[in-house]
Amino acid sequence: MAIGQAAPAAGTSGTATAPAKVNLIRPITLRRAQDLWFGCLVIDPNSGQLQIVQTAADGGGTRKPDPPGVSQLLTSARPWHNARFEVGGQSEAGFTVTMPGYPIVIHGPGLQTMLVRLNYYCSDTMIDPQGSSIWVGGKLDIPENPRPGHYSGDFEVTVAYQ
């Protein structure tokens, strides 16, 4: 103690302990397992109506799209053409899904574009021990007189623990 300092009064200091804790969990993972595929669109030269042609691997046959575009996902449907993402991580942990809240643009020949309004479905937002899936579909807005060719684009899906 330095000269001129008073000694602390008895009972004016104390000590306590506190536990230090951590919960180590597996990282959340997201893997694309299947692409979003709208099929091949054919414009009937006589009627001008659109049809989707599916290959035998896709179930075969043709169907008319829902005007004015093509819907790929309803509520719990899991058809071949929806994108599928596999979610992994800590079993029984909850997760949230974030997707673009606006239509995405897919680009075709020249400057031709189409819009896709995305939606998704997952049966549960808890990670199943065998993994969980998110199904993504949407509505394709087809412009009047679309140019033939291949149209494609990307969209982002984000998952995070709740």
Image (spheres, rainbow, N blue to C red):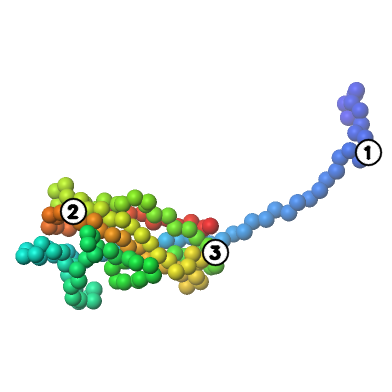
> What's the amino acid at mark 1?
Ala
Find disc 1 in the rendering and name its residue. Answer: 10
Find disc 3 in the rendering and name its residue. Answer: 93
Q: Position of residue 158 (x, y in %)?
A: 42, 55
Q: Mark 2: few, some, or many residues within 10 Å (few <14, many ≥20)?
A: few
From mark 2 to mark 1, how far is it between C-alphas?
85 Å
Tell me if label 3 and label 1 are in contact, CB under 8 Å: no
Q: Position of residue 21 (x, y in %)?
A: 67, 55
Q: Mark 1: few, some, or many residues within 10 Å (few <14, many ≥20)?
A: few
> What's the amino acid at mark 2?
Pro
> Which is more toward the observer, 139 or 58?
139
Query: Which of pointers 3 and 2 indicates the residue nearer the eye?
Result: 2
From mark 3 to mark 1, how far is it between C-alphas?
51 Å
User: Can see residue 32?
Assistant: no
Q: Secondary structure at mark 1?
A: loop
Position of 55 compared to 1: left or right?
Answer: left
Position of 93 compared to 79: left or right?
Answer: right
User: Vertically, is 137 above or below 10?
Assistant: below
Q: Mark 3: few, some, or many residues within 10 Å (few <14, many ≥20)?
A: some
